[in-house]
Image: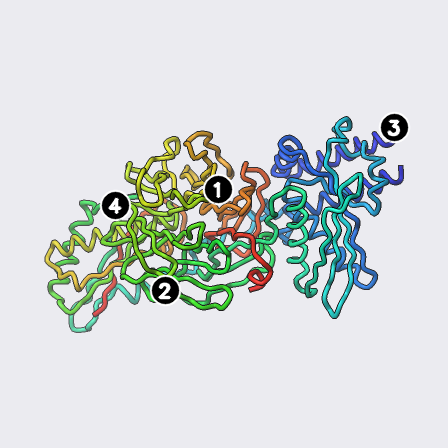
Amino acid sequence: MKSTSLTFKLLVLCLVMLTNGSGQNDVYMRIQTEKYQPVYLYIKPLQSKDHPAIAKHLQNYIISDLEKTKFFKIILTPDPEKIQLNDSALTIDVENLQAISRAYFEGQMEWIQNSVTLNGTLQGLPERYLIFTQKYSSPQASIRWMAHQIADDIVLQLTGQPGIASTQILFINKSKNLALMDADGDNTRQITNNKSLNLSPCWSPAGDKVAFVSYVKNNPELIILNLENKETTRLSKIKATYSSPAWSPNGKKIAFTLIKDGNSDIYVIDNQGNNLKQLTFNNSIDTSPSWSPTGREIAFTSDRSGSPQIYIMDNNGQNVHRLTYETKYSDSPVWSPRGELIAFVSREKTGFHIYSIDINGENLQRLTDGRGSNENPSWSPDGSKLTFASSRSGNWNIYIINSDGSGLCQISTTGTNTSPKWSPRLSWEVAKG
Amino acid sequence: MRNTLLLTTLLMTGLCIGTCSKKVAVAPENVKEKSTTPVQSPVIEIKAPETVAKKKTVQPAETPIYQFRDIHFDFDRYELKPETIEILSEHARQLKKNQNIKILIEGHCDEWGTIEYNLALGERRSNSVKNFLIKYGISQDRLSTISYGKERPLVAEHNASAWAKNRRAALVTGS
């Protein structure tokens, strides 16, 4: 027992050393232990006689996805029974061991005609009751996406809400074209190919289409790209400058900024490009609309008070009210998926920083620090994280941060990447493109 | 005891896998390391010199070449400054002299604003110039506007002098 407690102390020391290496991890660990009671998830090491390296990769991808959620404490073990006996070595909260939720995931790998198959089983502990059993299959090249799906299924079963590993991030790349990458930064590919400027991309709620602004016909206009059949549709029918499209949560409308005679106002149009309706009638700059998750309200930026600030209005343009007062220059509002928060950017000495505020205007919180500018925040579909573009490394790249500002993570490295938009949850059919 | 050690190792492995920096696949401490790599400006690939050379010269050759100088603006403003009104008046006189010239007025911004806001601000700047020229008697059908926001800076540097030069309306000639 003495040696066990020594081992535990060593483990804690190792953790402290690990976290001291990076301030971000320090915060992450604190949040993990203070705010959330993690589920103890025991995972049997994946094995494959013929392809041990692939088994190892698959296992690491699954664990990596699960750890990012903050919901789990992962313990790799071939035998969950033995682990339970030694649990006191693992947890500070020994007395509450009975109250801790525990589960065991086991996967059997097989090869069927160059495809990797995994029969996954999730059991509740200590009774070992079956939570789910599921067969996954994938070509070897896309085992990473298969890992994302397995992780998301485990998250769904143990937390009640779907995970976000099977999501992608849409962004503007160095050549000013639209590009996609998986939410872990893997699998980057360009999806438009013109020599023009393309800006402000956004997702349809189903994740099957994207809307964006393009200068491909010289004047900036609104274009919809169908990701499944690659067809493009021009949404803008009158000649003007179009900007910042935002798809309504039910997929039927698109809010955007239309700039005519120098004045920019917010409009909505249906997804066929018909029924244009003007929502703001103001002589100042109104731009960057973001729908509430119910679709009933729209947050936007306006400089009607003298400097850009965040406002909220009903989806018919009524009941306008100002949300931000404490920040001098605010822009890029994005409504959180659960509806309680709005993230936005505020300008400071070195550039923009990401903030969040409750929709009643209280509880203003700065989520980023450091140098450079941080722009265009976008929520993960579960509201647990935000992606944004930052010049903090000297060049623009895409980053992810937890909604409380912890766990900063750089996911693109190629540079000059901007305007990230987090996708809804995607099926493999949509995701493979 | 052996079990515990094994477990510790396994747990540590799990924790290491879970940390973010591994996922970026370049170097474990890459967020910090990045800052030591040469600073690549996001705007460096924009072909500013070509734009200047091509767009600022009045053809045909028999008329003396007139340079339509950029009209500059204050930060986050689109009103014409007193010192630019003289420049713009001369532009207008030139346009009256050369009736076959059409003008595209490009509105541009510095990097101190979001992409979307700057697109609106750039449009306002180009429109301020357009309205001035119309008041001066230039026909509206000879004038069109476009906004590039902060996407096409003239100077790809990050200092006050560059920002001042980038907050501009550029008059591009065509016929």
Image x and y of residue B61, in percent: 19, 73
Pointer 4 or 3: first along the chain: 3
- Is residue B51 or residue A380 the one in the foreground? A380
Which chain hosts label 2? A
Q: Amino acid at mark 3?
A: Lys
Q: Is residue B19 above or below residue B174?
A: above
Q: Amino acid at mark 2?
A: Arg
- Tell whether label 2 touches label 1 (CB within 8 Å): no
Residue drawn at point x = 23 percent, y = 57 percent: B69
Q: Is residue A401 above or below residue B95?
A: above
- Is residue B20 or residue A210 the one in the foreground? A210
Q: Amino acid at mark 1?
A: Ser
Residue highlighted by disc 3 = A2
Q: Secondary structure at mark 3?
A: helix
Residue highlighted by disc 4 = A281
- Is residue B120 or residue A10 the one in the foreground? B120
> Disc 3 and disc 2: Cα gap in Å?
72 Å
Label annotation for residue A234: 2
For the N terminus of chain A, which image quadrant?
top right
How packed mark 4 is, by other alpha carbons closer than 10 Å (few <14, some 14-19, many 20 or more), is: few
Q: Secondary structure at mark 1?
A: loop
Asked if badges 1 and 4 are on one and the same chain, I answer yes
Asked if badges 1 and 2 are on one and the same chain, I answer yes
Is A320 displayed left or right of A183 in the figure?
left
Image x and y of residue A254, in percent: 38, 54
> Disc 4 and disc 3: Cα gap in Å?
74 Å
Label annotation for residue B126: none
Residue drawn at point x = 45 percent, y = 42 percent: A335
